[in-house]
Image (tube, rainbow, N blue to C red):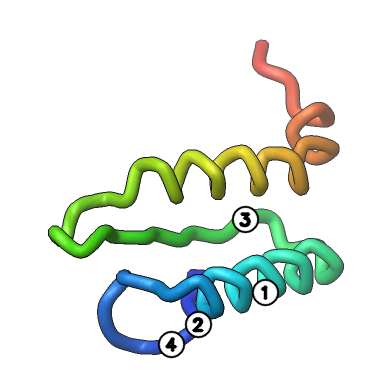
Amino acid sequence: MIRPRVGDFLYSRDELGIMLEDIRIIKQLDVRGFVLGVLNREGRVDVECMKAWVILTFYHFRKRLTAFSVS
């Protein structure tokens, strides 16, 4: 699980940067997957932030995904 610290899932811009760097590192380690989550101040999923993460992580792992085929 990608987390810059213990506690809640409401992250600052700096903490999101740490998470991004962690994703870059695990990509180099040939990790097959990871989970992450970001909440907003109301305690709900931060949809806009998560959309950005999905796009980013898909971009970083797309080579792996293109090697996968569904029969």
Left or right: 45 as drawn, with respect to 64? left
Residue holding disc 3: 33
When asked about the image quadrant of residue 8, the answer is: bottom left
Question: On residue 5, which mark appears?
Answer: 4
**Which of marks 2 and 3 precedes in the sequence?**
2
Residue holding disc 1: 22
Mark 1 and mark 3: Cα distance apart in space: 12 Å
Q: Position of residue 54 (x, y in %)?
A: 55, 42
52 or 60, which lies in front?
Answer: 52
Q: Residue at x 80, y 27 (%)?
A: 66
**Crowd class of label 2 (few under 14; some 14 to 19; many from 20; radius 10 Å):** some
39 or 6, which lies in front?
Answer: 39
When asked about the image quadrant of residue 5, the answer is: bottom left
**Which of marks 4 and 1 precedes in the sequence?**
4
Mark 2 and mark 4: Cα distance apart in space: 4 Å
Q: Amino acid at mark 2?
A: Pro
Left or right: 15 as drawn, with respect to 32? left
**Which of marks 2 and 1 precedes in the sequence?**
2
